[in-house]
C-alpha cells in the first residue's frame, strides 16, 4: 500500500468523522435541555413503562441506556422497561448511519421500527414473567440529572450544556476516526474484493458475530457495526443483531452494582438471544 492510498484513507476518515462530530455535538446540546423531564417520564408503570422505554431508547446517544440503568438500580424502573430501553437503543449508530448518506441510509427507517417493536414487546413479556418487582412510585430530584458521566456537574450549566456535549462529541470523533481509518487501511491493504469475498464466505455467521461485537460496552462497537453495514460488509439482519444487543455503557453501570448481578445477567441474556434470533430471522426473510 502506497503513501498516496494511505493519505486518501486518512482524509476520507477525517471528513466522515467531522460530519459525525457535528451531528453528535448539536444533538447533545439539544438533549441536555430536556434531561430532567425525560427522567421523570421514564418512571411510568404498567404497559406504559416498556412503551416509553422503547421510545426513549431510540434517542441515539449513550446517555439513554445509562439513565435507564441508573433508574433501574434505584428501583424506579421495572426489568421489562429496562429491557425495552436496552433493545431499542443503538448508542450512536443512528447518527453514524444518517451522517453517511447513501442508498442504505433509508434502512434506518425499518431499523428504528423493528428495534422499537422488538423492545416494546420483549419489555412487556419480561414484566409479565417477572410480575413481583420492588419498584418505588415517585422519582426524586437526585435522579433527574443522570448522563453517561457519573461525575456529571449538575450545578454547572456551562458544563452541562456545552462542555459535556463537546467532550462526548470529541470522544466519539476519535472512535469514528480510528474505526474509519482502520477499516479503510485494512480494506486498502487486503483489497476491497478480497475483503468482500471473506465476508461473503462467512455471511452465515454475521448475525452471531455482530451480536458478540455489540456486547462491547463502548460507542466504538455500534460505530463499527454501522460502518460495516454501510460498507456492504454485513447484511441488514446482522446490523439489526448488533444494534439490538448494543446498549452503550448501560451494562457497565448495571454490573458495577454487586447486588444486581442476577437481573443484569438476565437482561444481558435476553438481549443477546433476542438479537441473534431476530437477526437470523431477518436475514432469512430478506436474504444474507
Image (spheres, helix red, strand yellow):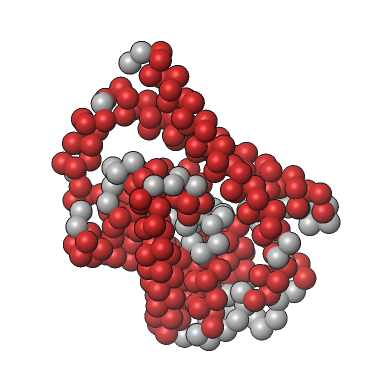
Q: In the depicted view, which residue is nearer to us: 22 or 71?
A: 22
User: Seen in the image, is 214 located left or right of residue 256?
Assistant: left
Residue 20 pos. (x, y %): 54, 43
Residue at the image point whose x is 72% and y is 68% from the top: 36
Q: Residue at x 69, y 43 (%)?
A: 166
Image coordinates for residue 230, horizontal then vertical, percent: 36, 45
Q: Quadrant of residue 182?
A: top left
**Residue 117 visible, this angle:** yes
Which residue is at a point 52% across and 71% down the rendered structure image?
A: 55
56 sits to left or right of 279: right
Q: Height in image: 173 above or below 73?
A: above
Q: How many marks?
A: 0
x, y percentage for residue 145? Answer: 73, 62
Residue visible at 29% across and 44% down?
232
Vertical side of 16 occupied by 145: above or below: below
Q: Nearer the viewer, residue 193 or 88?
A: 193
Q: Is residue 22 left or right of residue 208?
A: right
Amino acid at each position: 500500500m502506497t503513501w498516496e492510498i494511505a493519505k486518501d484513507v486518512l482524509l476520507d476518515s477525517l471528513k466522515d468523522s467531522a460530519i459525525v462530530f457535528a451531528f453528535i455535538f448539536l444533538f447533545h446540546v439539544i438533549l441536555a435541555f430536556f434531561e430532567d423531564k425525560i427522567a421523570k417520564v421514564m418512571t411510568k408503570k404498567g404497559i406504559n413503562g416498556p412503551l416509553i422505554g422503547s421510545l426513549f431508547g431510540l434517542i441515539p446517544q449513550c446517555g439513554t441506556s445509562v439513565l435507564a440503568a441508573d433508574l433501574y438500580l434505584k428501583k424506579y424502573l421495572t426489568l421489562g422497561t429496562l429491557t425495552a430501553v436496552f433493545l431499542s437503543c443503538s448508542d450512536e449508530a443512528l447518527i453514524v448511519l444518517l451522517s453517511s448518506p447513501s442508498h442504505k441510509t433509508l434502512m434506518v427507517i425499518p431499523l428504528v421500527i423493528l428495534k422499537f417493536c422488538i423492545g416494546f414487546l420483549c419489555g412487556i413479556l419480561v414484566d409479565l414473567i417477572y410480575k413481583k418487582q420492588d419498584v418505588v412510585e415517585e422519582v426524586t430530584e437526585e435522579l433527574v440529572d443522570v448522563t453517561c458521566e457519573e461525575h456529571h456537574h449538575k450545578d454547572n450549566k456551562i458544563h452541562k450544556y456545552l462542555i459535556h456535549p463537546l467532550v462526548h462529541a470529541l470522544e466519539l470523533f476519535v472512535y469514528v476516526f480510528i474505526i474509519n481509518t482502520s477499516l479503510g487501511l485494512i480494506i486498502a491493504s487486503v483489497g476491497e474484493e478480497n475483503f468482500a469475498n471473506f465476508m461473503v464466505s462467512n455471511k452465515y455467521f454475521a448475525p452471531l458475530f455482530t451480536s458478540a461485537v455489540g456486547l462491547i460496552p463502548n460507542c466504538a462497537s455500534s460505530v463499527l457495526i454501522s460502518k460495516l453495514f454501510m460498507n456492504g460488509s454485513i447484511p441488514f439482519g446482522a446490523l439489526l443483531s448488533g444494534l439490538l444487543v448494543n446498549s452503550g455503557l448501560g451494562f457497565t453501570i448495571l454490573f458495577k452494582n454487586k447486588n444486581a448481578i442476577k437481573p443484569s445477567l438476565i437482561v444481558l441474556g435476553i438481549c443477546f438471544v433476542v438479537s441473534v434470533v431476530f437477526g437470523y430471522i431477518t436475514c432469512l426473510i430478506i436474504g444474507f
